[in-house]
Image: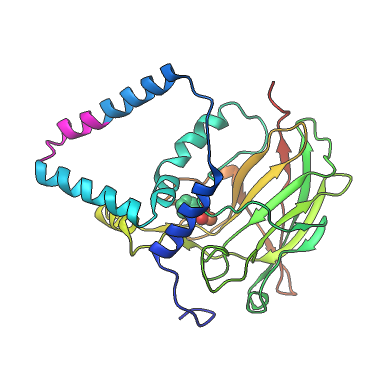
Amino acid sequence: MTTTEHESPTAVGSGTAATDKFKNERVSADTSPERVAAIARDALSALHKVILDHNVTYPEYRVLKQWLIDVGEGGEWPLFLDVFIEHAVEEVLARSRKGTKGSIEGPYYVADAPELPSVCTLPMREVDTKETPLVFSGQVTDLDGKGIGGAIVELWHADADGYYSQFADHLPEWNLRGKIITDGEGRYQVTTIQPAPYQIPTDGPTGAFIAAQNGHPWRPAHLHLIVSAPEHESVTTQLYFDGGEWLDSDVASATKPELVLRPTSGDDGINRVTYDFVLDPAAG
Ligand code: BEZ
Ligand code: FE
């Protein structure tokens, strides 16, 4: 057992929660039928090439079918796609951005977190207060360095055991999640705890896929953020910690050198770090 005594969340438990959340969002995209057809054609060609290059057999094809069924039944599509595919989509978005570098959102974002003032503490349990406190502060500006008052710094992260609230039954709703509203100069200061590295659930089909490649299931410790303000493009990103384990081999391929924090640890046992966010103007 870890910091607290509880049943470990299972892949099927957190996967199903992630799938249910995604299904409720009812997404759509403004994509022309021609573009859909071209992408579908190229995706199939790429897959056919892999099958032909590797002489894939019928038994292997049937194992693939079974595995795809297992991913769906385990509710693991959000997990699998966000680990192995999302970083490429984010790379496309990054081509048109000048401000703060983005990173993947991952499957554990939940909208409508509690709003908090510019100087605040994230909602946390009593047991979380025993972890290393992290005071994270900075400013949100535009591309010219002008502070943006009333910007929203939405922050969510795993606890010291690597679990996210709303995706693990033993955690209270909104634990380590909040929307911080910047002051008139765009400044914020939030107290939270140092997150731990996060392990992709290993007991389901995504875990089996990782093991089949002799890979490891770890993401480095990270903070998730969505920073937004009227008339600006919002940025979805993550911040990592210098020297952190798995920083050079993130299973989700989502780290960038510009997104690495270097906190100082004070004599009072508190880690402190600043990070400024720069927002692009709204497109069009
Ligand atoms: C995460 O950042 O927590 C995450 C990203 C991709 C897949 C699973 C988790
Ligand atoms: Fe995460």
Q: Where is residue 104 in the image (x, y as percent from the top left)?
A: 53, 44
Asked where in the image residue 206 lies, by quadrant, the reply is bottom left
* Magenta stretch contains residue 49: yes
Nearer-the-camera pick, 23 or 241: 23
Residue at point 26% right, 25% down? Answer: 45
Q: Position of residue 243 (x, y in %)?
A: 54, 58
Task: From the viewer's perspective, tell me whether residue 203 is left or right of residue 244.
Answer: left
Q: Where is residue 44 in the image (x, y as percent from the top left)?
A: 28, 28
Extreme residue toward the right, this view? 184
Extreme residue toward the top, this view? 34
Residue at point 78% right, 35% down? Answer: 230
Task: From the viewer's perspective, tell me whether residue 211 is left or right of residue 3.
Answer: left
* Magenta stretch contains residue 52: yes
Residue at point 74% right, 33% down? Answer: 232
What are the residue bounds of the magenta stretch? 47-57
Residue at point 22% right, 51% down? Answer: 66
Can the viewer see residue 199 in this picture? no
